[in-house]
Image (tube, helix red, strand yellow):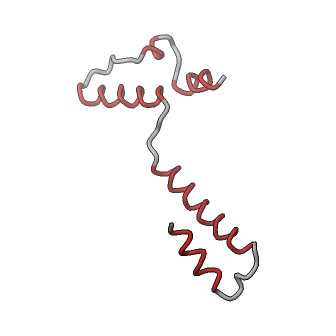
C-alpha cells in the first residue's frame, strides 16, 4: 500500500519519467527491508537455539557442567552447523 503512494508521488516528480525509475526505488526499498530483516529477525536454527538455552541455564543456575547432547559427542556448534548443511 505504501509503495503505491510513493510510486504515484515519484512518477509526478521531474526526472522520474522513465520505466527504470520505479525499479530503482523498488531496489532501494528492497535493500532497506533486507537489512532490517537480517538485523532484527530472531535465530531459527534449532542447534543455535538449544545452545543459547544451555548457556542461559548455565548462567542462571551456576552449573558449569551442563552440556548439550552434541557437545557430549565432542562436536562444537560450528562443526554441527556444517553437518546440518551437508
Percent from the top left, x then y, of residue 28? 62, 66
Return the residue found at the far top.
73
**Which quarter of the picture shows residue 58?**
top left
Q: In this view, does 65 lie above or below 11?
A: above
Residue located 60% across and 74% down the image: 7
**Left or right for 64, reference 29:** left
Count of all numbered marks drawn on residues in the image: 0
In the depicted view, which residue is nearer to us: 16 or 38?
16
Residue 21, above or below 42: below
Q: Observer-nearest residue: 24 or 3?
A: 3
Q: Which residue lies furthest to the bottom in this view?
A: 14
Corner quadrant of residue 14: bottom right
Instruction: Give whichever of 24, 63 is nearer the camera.
Output: 24
Give the x, y percent position of residue 86. 66, 22
Q: Which residue: 33% across, 16% down?
A: 65
- Residue at horizontal 69%, vertical 69%? 24
What percent of the width, then of the height, locates residue 32?
A: 56, 62
Above or below residue 30? Residue 64 is above
Instruction: Determine whether, in the image, residue 57 is placed left or right of residue 81.
Output: left
**Viewer-nearest residue: 5 or 64:** 5
Residue appearing at x 75%, y 72% in the figure? 20
Q: Residue 44: percent from the left, percent from the top?
A: 47, 35
Residue 35 quadrant: bottom right
Residue 31 lies left or right of residue 16; in this view the side is left
Amino acid at each position: 500500500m505504501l509503495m503505491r503512494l510513493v510510486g504515484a508521488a515519484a512518477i509526478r516528480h521531474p526526472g522520474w519519467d522513465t520505466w527504470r525509475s520505479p525499479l530503482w526505488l523498488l531496489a532501494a526499498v528492497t535493500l532497506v527491508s533486507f537489512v532490517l530483516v537480517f538485523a532484527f529477525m530472531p535465530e531459527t536454527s534449532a542447534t543455535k537455539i538449544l545452545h543459547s538455552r544451555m548457556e542461559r541455564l548455565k548462567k542462571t543456575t551456576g552449573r558449569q557442567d551442563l552440556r548439550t547432547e552434541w557437545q557430549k559427542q565432542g562436536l562444537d556448534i560450528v562443526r554441527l552447523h556444517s553437518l546440518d548443511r551437508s
